[in-house]
Image: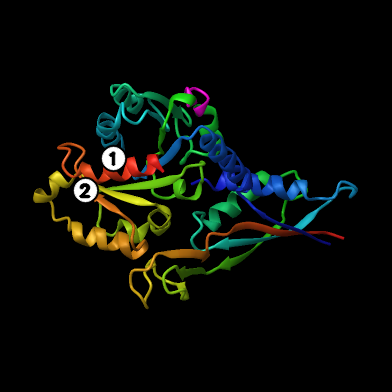
Amino acid sequence: MHEMGVAQQMINIALSSIPKDIVNPKVEKLNLKIGRLAAVVEDSLRFCFDIIAKDSPLEGAELVVEHVAVKVRCKSCDKTWEVDDPIFSCSSCKDGAVEIISGRELEIISIELAE
Amino acid sequence: MEIKIQKKMLEANESDAEKNRKNFKDKNIFVLNVMSSPGSGKTETLCKTLKMVMPKIRTGVIVGDICTHNDADRLEASGAKVVQINTDKFGGDCHLSANMIDKAAKEFDLDNLDLLIVENIGNLVCPAEFDIGENARVVLLSVTEGEDKPLKYPLMFQVADAAILNKIDLLPYLDFNANEAVDNMRKVHPQMPVFQLSAKTEEGFEPWIEWLFGCVKK
């Protein structure tokens, strides 16, 4: 539901990363990392991006998304594993509190400019 | 030409949240972010909570809604200072963000506050993603919802520090299986404290209030 806001933040970061000395910059790609547990809907993010990017150096840029699996670590027995279902209890010691190592990413990794 | 960025998309909110956390820590205020779906009884639970903790704990409330001042009116009856945030008159945002909390906090006398409760917008998705500078998060589920809600909204229950199962006075009239709901919460978040209570009858409030006192004293 907040993808418009996220798209706006993403665009602000991308635009401020373009070197000032480039005349008429054109961004071709935005490389992103989105964790499986991040509360964004990718289709909505793309839709919002296309609307806000209009008439900017980002117009028409491709969003390349690397999806990040949810990985957790058991704080009791130190076991780490990948979570497929929304079940976070440790299969070894059953009740250990877990720490999320990855899967909440919502990051902009790089942009690729046209030569 | 590739330009490396490596930044979080929500870095602006996260940096505002850290500023809030520091400001509140300087004033020795514990901030509790209360989240749930609409209609699970956040406001009634907080009304009863305020009645039980005040004036021992000097408490302020920030309440977020898309529209209306109704929740603030109900909470103000406790004598607590309440600030209502409306995200928009029609439609509006799905969560509170850190900058909204900073703005609302300016309306409190922070030198005379021990606990600031933020009643977030009713939504089990978006508020889980947005740090507001809180010290702890509490998620409410009521017995009129499904037992499988924790599995459907895992992020919310995973990031919560405690959960409340509300409206237990209705259990005799419903097919809701409270043990199954608690099991599902613990599948998503093992060891999370779960308080089963009724905001209507005030049954089960003692452990919840004790937990809250423990948080504020730390």
Stretch of the chain drawn in magenta: B105-110
At 38% from the left and 43% from the top, the residue drawn is B215
The residue carrying mark 2 is B144
Q: Going by the image, does B215 lie left or right of A104?
A: left
Q: Say which amino acid is labelled 2.
A: Thr
Q: Is residue B150 left or right of residue A108?
A: left
Q: Which amino acid, mark 1?
A: Gly
State the image coordinates of residue A62 (x, y, percent, origin top left).
Answer: 69, 59
Where residue A110 sits, quadrant-wise, is: bottom right
The residue most toward the front is B217
Label 1 marks which chain's residue?
Answer: B
Task: Label the magenta part by its dominant secondary structure.
Answer: loop
Examine the image and state in which quarter residue B41 appears. top left
Mark 1 highlights which residue?
B39
Q: Name the chain letter of the residue that bears numbered label 2.
A: B
Q: Quadrant of the C terminus of chain A?
A: bottom right
- Of labels 1 and 2, earlier in sequence is 1
| Along the line of sight, the residue nearer the viewer: B71 or B81 | B81
Secondary-structure class at tag 2: loop
**Residue at figure coordinates x 34%, y 51% from the top left:** B162
Residue A14 lies, in percent from the top left, at 73, 50
User: Percent from the top left, x then y, of residue B48?
Assistant: 24, 33
Side of A19 relative to B58 (left or right): right
Find out whether residue A47 is within the magenta segment.
no
**Residue in the picture at 43% in, 50% down:** B125
Label 1 vs label 2: CA separation? 9 Å
The residue depicted at 46 percent of the width and 41 percent of the height is B95
Do residues under tags 1 and 2 come within 8 Å of each other at their CB atoms? Answer: yes
